[in-house]
Image (spheres, rainbow, N blue to C red):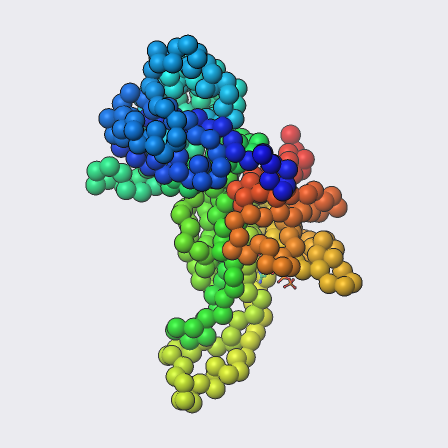
Amino acid sequence: MQDESGQKQGHRIVLGVGGGIAAYKACHVVRDLKEAGDDVRVIPTESALKFVGAATFEALSGHPVSTTVFDAVDEVQHVRLGQEADLIVIAPATADLLARLAGGRADDLLTASVLVATCPVLIVPAMHTEMWFNPATRRNVEILRGYGYTVMEPAHGRLTGKDTGPGRLPEPEQIADLARTLAAGFTVPHSWAGLNVLISAGGTQEPIDPVRFIGNRSSGRQGFALAEIAAQRGASVTLVAGDTAQLPTPPGAKVIRVRSTGEMKEAMDDRAAGADVIIMAAAVADFRPQTAAATKMKKGSESAAGLTSIEMIENPDILAGLVQSRRDGELQRATTIVGFAAETGDERTSALEYAKAKLARKGCDLLMANDVSGDAVFGKLRNRGWLLSADGTVAEVRDGTKLDVAAQILAAVDAHRTRSLPN
Ligand code: CTP
């Protein structure tokens, strides 16, 4: 089955489950994938069944569950499941499972299935912070990435005991989203280790008084998706987030919360000098109230006049300022700067033409433009558009989830860096 953009729907996904406390979250991953129309076969390890019973996985997936190569031998199951899969996801992957996969073991149905698979493999580790940073685990992760598998960055947060740190399983919907992006054929190579990526997301809020503000409809989803893909590429990611929907923190990214354009500008300017890639995905207010009242404006009082007519002044252009700082030598010359443009066309000029003019005006290297007429983008889960380059090229960004679009944008940023950096 294909969707309207011609992409295959309903992938065959093998979900491997390792024996860790986070195994219960795998149930939500099965449900998320099934709801999107995927066919899911669950292969737990023997120890995973100590945390969640086979009956649960069978009921959720609608398929029998087995851990060993000695079940359904007549169907050669240990070869068939891996061969037929469009994607293998392993969540949670324990330190022990990582070691067994890195060593090429095939001593249960899950590891045997991975060994025969030629499809993309997404491994989602979850373990205590000490285990995650242990040199043996680091080496196993590196080996697995070397095999071409995608190893998801763990989330930072509460672990099984009272401790917190990196090692927590990302949220089930984050795992399912990345799984779908890989199943759709997008790749997320781990090639940005050592790069600093700075991204803004969400809308700004311009205060009128302590309880009121002028805002906009940006959900921040595209910026968060970019931060997630940049972190999966191995970069050190800082996400400056304004007003956003309730979105989980992208695993591996550091989030700085801001409200107004002034605060966002300060946060971006402070960190820009060390950045290799800067992406302004935020919806920044062009104007703000000239003064914000210190106390709440009361209806019927003298200050209410300030609510019926608000004097506005122009905000600084953060993106244009960053481009100017690079010209002035305050940023690394090789910093790639990416802007966004949500446009609507009119009877004389198309959205794409407006975007081309904006790229020239802003002076950034790449501009992700989309046509937002007809309510197509704000708050929605999918996106599409064009990626404009300062050299005049225009590439189509295929319709997809915001994570799919982020994978396409960062692949273009990578290609831009390869073209423009000295060897
Ligand atoms: N931007 C910014 N600072 C502003 C306004 C916009 O950094 N004060 C950035 C946005 O984050 C985005 C790009 O500039 O990356 C284009 O934003 P947009 O609102 O489309 O641009 P404007 O310059 O406001 O153009 P328009 O006249 O279409 O409103």
Rendered position, 329 above or below 59: below
Rendering coords of residue 367 (x, y %): 65, 49
Rendered position, 234 above or below 397: above
Rendering coords of residue 27 (x, y %): 34, 35
Q: Is residue 255 left or right of residue 393?
A: left
Q: Quadrant of residue 40?
A: top left
| 377, 225: nearer the viewer | 377
Q: Which quarter of the rendered picture does the N terminus lie within?
A: top right
Residue at the extreme left: 162
Q: Is residue 369 visible?
A: yes
Q: Is residue 274 visible?
A: no
Rendered position, 94 above or below 339: above
Q: Residue at x 58, y 43 (%)?
A: 400
Q: Residue at x 39, y 31 (%)?
A: 61
| 304, 29: nearer the viewer | 29
| 140, 336: nearer the viewer | 140
Q: Residue at x 60, y 36 (%)?
A: 2
Rendering coords of residue 348 (x, y %): 78, 63
Rendering coords of residue 129 (x, y %): 30, 33
Q: Quadrant of residue 46?
A: top left
Q: Residue at x 27, y 30 (%)?
A: 52
